[in-house]
Image: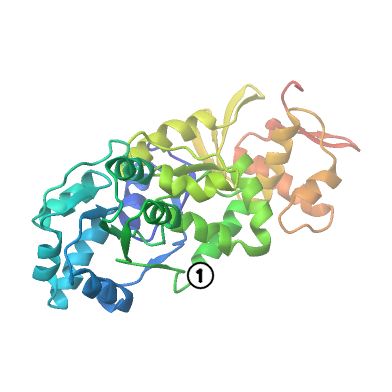
Amino acid sequence: MNGPLAGFTIGVTAARRADELIALLERKGASVIHGPAIRILPLPDDAELHQATSRLVLAPVDVVVATTAIGFRGWFEAAEGWGLASRLHRAMEGAVVLPRGPKAKGAVRAAGLVETWSPTSESNAELLQYLLRMGVAGKRVAVQLHGEPLPDFVGSLRAAGADVVEIPVYRWEPPADIAPLDRLIDAVLAGQVDALTFTSAPAASSVLRTAGERYGDLVEALRRNVLVVGVGAITAGPLVAAGIPVVQPVRSRIGSMVRELTVELPARATRLRIASRDMEMRAQAVVIDGELRPVAPAPMAVLRTLVAARGRVVSRQDLLAALPSGGEEHAVETAIGRLRTALGSPQMVCTVVKRGYRLAMEPV
């Protein structure tokens, strides 16, 4: 055992800063499966941003909404490459500048601008309430998007009389290679993932969309068997809309998300007393009396079925149905043998003659 997440398998869907997140999880002992759900279209190559910026610098704006630090910084970097940076700065000099959170605030200041106000919740909803209270009728409002359109936000401003200029500073696209994400979804469905992490709403939407025909099974697995962790409320939005519970940190930061996961995941682990041994479940391993022991997929599928029975007898037919690849009845005997070896204590799994197998614990 090495770290509070030892033996746990955690899925990472992030593209940007994925290496940082993976390193944090691995330092705490976790095994990681990385399936990037999105990719970011490079800013200088985005014709839409160039067009929006050229339109914006034609006249000063009254309000600037900065939703993300990376987007706001990238916008000015792209404008510099197009020779528009000084004109962009002049267009914003007298504006009410509203960054969504501390990181966006830092990017605003780095651009030589001064923020007017920033929501403590770091939410678009609080930003919108502030703008509507302030009054936007007849005002020109620049809204920096964060990868996807913000139809409700922008629509509310336009309904209140604002002239809104949407700034698509970057776009989320499906990953160039979808295979790693498909493998991650397959691992979730096979019960091989303890927790799944999300750092952006587009990534959450992409995972659900990529599931395709597996959508119903994936949602059910995320509702019942997998701890789903999002970096904040905006990220959690598409998942919550699908009825998936999402654990979120108080502060929308990757480090805070990992700390929350480190507390929440071990607390959820199934713990049993079997044949005078303490056993704790993981997706791809067990902990027996404090010793981490990996378990292969087939014997793990058998173990999960026996654990669910809580000491009652499970027939060979039911265990056969639980095996990932099915097979003949002798496949159950093989999986039981491998399970006993993996547990390191054969007496933990009892054979009940002509009936099946059970864990050596009192039935609940």
Taking the spot 32% from the left edge, 37% from the top edge, the residue there is 121
Instruction: Label 1, secondary structure: give it.
Output: loop
On screen, 171 above or below 117? below
Left or right: where does residue 95 sit relative to residue 134? left
Whether residue 210 is visible here, answered yes or no, is yes
Residue 212: where, in percent of width, then height?
63, 64
Image quarter for residue 337? top right
For the N terminus, which image quadrant? top left
Residue at screen point 75% across, 27% down? 311
> Label 1 is placed on what type of residue?
Ile
Toward the right, the furthest residue is 354
38 vs 199: above or below: below
Closer to us: 24 or 200: 200
Query: Residue 298 at what x, y percent from top left?
Result: 68, 51
- What's the colour scheme? rainbow
Q: Position of residue 75 (x, y in %)?
A: 22, 66
Residue drawn 18% across and 70% down? 57
Residue 290 makes an appearance in the image: no
Of the 4 image quadrants, the one containing the C terminus is top right
**Label 1 crowd (10 A; few <14 / some 14-19 / many >=20):** some
Left or right of 68: which side holds 172? right
- Total marks shown come to 1
In this view, the residue in front, 305 or 53, is: 53
Pinpoint residue 243: horizontal percent, then vertical percent: 60, 43
Q: Is residue 16 left or right of residue 32?
A: left
Camera-side residue of 138 and 328: 138
- Measuring 50% from the left and 40% from the top, which residue is drawn there? 246
Residue at numbered disc 1: 178
